Image (tube, grey):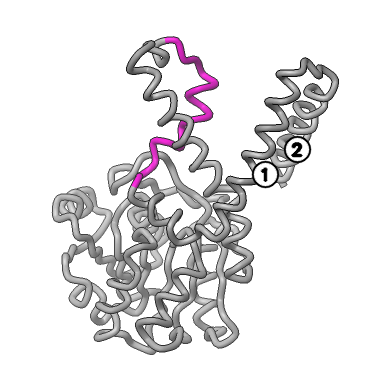
Amino acid sequence: MIERLCIIGVGLIGGSVARAARAEGLCHEIVGVDADADNLRKASACGVIDAGFSDIEQGAASADAVMIATPVGTFDVIFSALKSVWSTGAVVTDAGSTKCSVIESAERIFGEVPDNFVPGHPIAGAERSGVEASTVDLFRGKRVILTPLEDTSPLAVKRVESFWRSIGAKVSQMEPAHHDEVLAATSHLPHVLAFALTYMLGKKDEQTEIFQYAAGGFRDFTRIASSDPKMWLDICRANRREIVPLIHQFREELNVVAGLISSGAAEELFSVFADARNARQRFLDQLER
């Protein structure tokens, strides 16, 4: 049982962690820390947290578990604030979408990564943000990747893993660099593509009212372009070493497809589409396992 869970960043992810932990009876007290006072009031009013703080030191003091659920660009500031109240008896984890940048931030602030910090990333989300978008079942059946280091306390890892499993998540472990490589391909690049396409068509819409005639395919493909721009700015900056080569590779694939369309190479173009369809079906089959 967690006596006091402190969630730094009471938005979609942090709010959903709080809701799920409360529903499962995992904590005696849940406190939230957020720079947005209005968001804290909403979180308190709807019972997501028991108390809210704008000051990280106040919120994290005496907590035996801390979850950092803010954009990855904020971690230097957060670790600096936590340093003065860091307790070796507490377990600290995060929900950042990149892991090497988070680990590098901890090394900058502490000199080394504290052994009771367990880097993590829940593979769950929605295009909406803020505590009002949070749900009690956001993580149920979803994957959570933990990326502990060699010196990370096995007990801390066990506690974090147990917490995620208790709220319905499927937990696995991965090397931090491999996590960033995999997520760049499966999450970061698709978001960049959705933002870029919507940006391009948005400029056309100003002249030709193109959105008026957009159908379900456009809505489905660009749904994730409704995600928080600040969060995705931070992710792209933190993981640019993995994202940029993928953008160049995707550009090459687009050039190939453009060439096939331009030349009328029906069989070759059909083969690309069929292979892509089969690849997506393999993805769907894995989801059902």
Q: Which label is found at residue 287? A: 1
Which residue is found at the position 40% from the left and 75% from the top?
105
What residue is drawn where x is 38% and y is 46%? 135
First reached walking from the N terminus: tag 1 or tag 2: 2
> What is the crowding at mark 1: few (fewer than 14 residues within 10 Å), some, or many (at least 20)?
few
Q: What kind of secondary structure does the magenta stretch mostly adopt?
A: helix
Measured as percent of width and height from the top left, residue 161 is found at 54, 70
Please name whichever residue, 256 or 286, is drawn nearer the observer in this view of the structure.
256
Residue at label 2? 279
Q: Given the current orientation, which residue lies at the most extreme right position?
A: 267
Identify the disc placed on residue 144: none
Left or right placement of residue 252 versus residue 229 in this view:
right
Could you say which quadrant of the image residue 13 lies in? Answer: bottom left
Q: Say which residue appears at 37% left-offset and 17% top-offset.
A: 205
Q: Residue 156, image x and y in percent?
A: 50, 81
Measuring from the top left, give residue 77's x and y in whole percent: 28, 72
**Looking at the image, residue 159 lies above or below residue 280:** below
- Estimate the x, y position of residue 177 in percent, counting from the top left: 60, 68
Highlighted magenta segment, given as a residue range: 213-229
Residue 156 vertical placement versus 255 (above, below): below
The quadrant where residue 36 appears: bottom left
| Element type where label 2 sits in the image | helix
Q: Is residue 92 magenta?
A: no
Position of residue 203 relative to residue 45, above or below, is above
Any magenta on residue 214? yes
